[in-house]
Image (tube, helix red, strand yellow):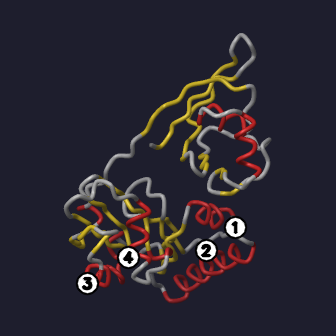
Amino acid sequence: MQTDKEDKLILSRAEDAMMLAEKNYSVRAVGFLNPRQRSLIIKNLYPSVDIRTEFIGGYPDAERTMLVCRPEYAEFEADDILSVIHISGRNLEKLTHRDYLGSLMGLGITRENIGDILVEPSGAFIFVKQEIADYITNNLEKIGRCGVKTLVCGCAEANIPKPKLREVNGTVSSLRIDAVLSAAAGISRGRAAEMIGQGLVSLNWEEINSASKQVEEGDLISARGVGRMRLERVGNLTRKGRIGITIVRFE
């Protein structure tokens, strides 16, 4: 979970970007931001009426995004600040998101410069800040022990793999997070509460420590070692007074 100091730093950077965009009539960007940081900015900062703000990740439903602040009239495209690195090679099917991220950070690139990493059997598409794209293509030769080729392309050229989703239907006695996690992950409610107490569970990207926290439709739950899931629908009460729910799990 982020500290108050880190939260204040993100808000300060975002506020500075808004002010500079207005003062200099220019486009300013902050990020990449994770969904929690994005939510923090939306809840706490209000741009001038002359400034438009949006979150850009390179494709619809991007998880990690950049905050873009610009005058209302200023033309802007995602490719102005983002590039996509297409990674290809042989025998890459066993590589994971962690492998790609680790290799990039091994080049001295910090996490805030890297957006989503979309892994497919033949390689990956990696969204990065435009200014570091050439550095990556000139220096990234291996992911793990696998030799790779890199190619910079525009956002529209990226063949975005569709996420693998699985629906889980069940019933819960309440919409407490320990009950919902139990139903979604197929674990006991006690184990779900234990994971929450150990700081292994986040709700909408914010670590929680209360098993009684209420979950609503659309909320995203992340549990370390279990994965991510979204409460898709809350149904009617059953005859036994339980609540029907539908959960989408990200495979």
Dividing the picture into quarters, in which one does residue 238 lie?
top right
Q: Secondary structure at mark 3?
A: helix
Residue 44 location (% of width, % of height): 70, 67
**Which residue in the structure is indicated by mark 3?**
138
* Image quadrant in which the N terminus is located: bottom right
Reply above or below: 105 against 121.
below
Check disc 3 and give the amino acid type. Asn
Vertical position of residue 7 compared to residue 232: above or below? below
Callout 2 secondary element: loop
- Residue assigned mark 4: 81
Position of 67 with respect to 205 (left or right) is left
Which of the two discs, 2 and 1, sits closer to the camera? 1
Q: Residue at x 54, y 47 (%)?
A: 227
Q: CA distance from mark 1 to mark 4?
A: 24 Å
Mark pair 4, 2: CA separation? 22 Å
Type of amino acid under label 2: Ser
Q: Quadrant of residue 113?
A: bottom left
Quarter of the image where the C terminus is located: top left
User: Residue 53, image x and y in percent?
Assistant: 52, 69
Residue furthest to the top in view is 239
Q: Nearer the viewer, residue 22 or 236?
A: 236
Q: Mark on residue 48?
A: 2
- Label 4 amino acid? Ile
Specify which label sits upstream in the sequence, 4 or 3.
4
Q: Nearer the viewer, mark 2 or mark 3?
A: 3
* Residue drawn at (51%, 36%) of the image: 248
Q: How many marks?
A: 4
Amino acid type of the residue that numbered disc 1 sits on in the rendered structure: Asn
Q: Which residue is mark 1?
A: 44
Query: Quick one: SS at disc 4?
Result: loop
Residue name at image x 75 percent, y 45 percent: 194
Q: Position of residue 88 (x, y in %)?
A: 22, 64
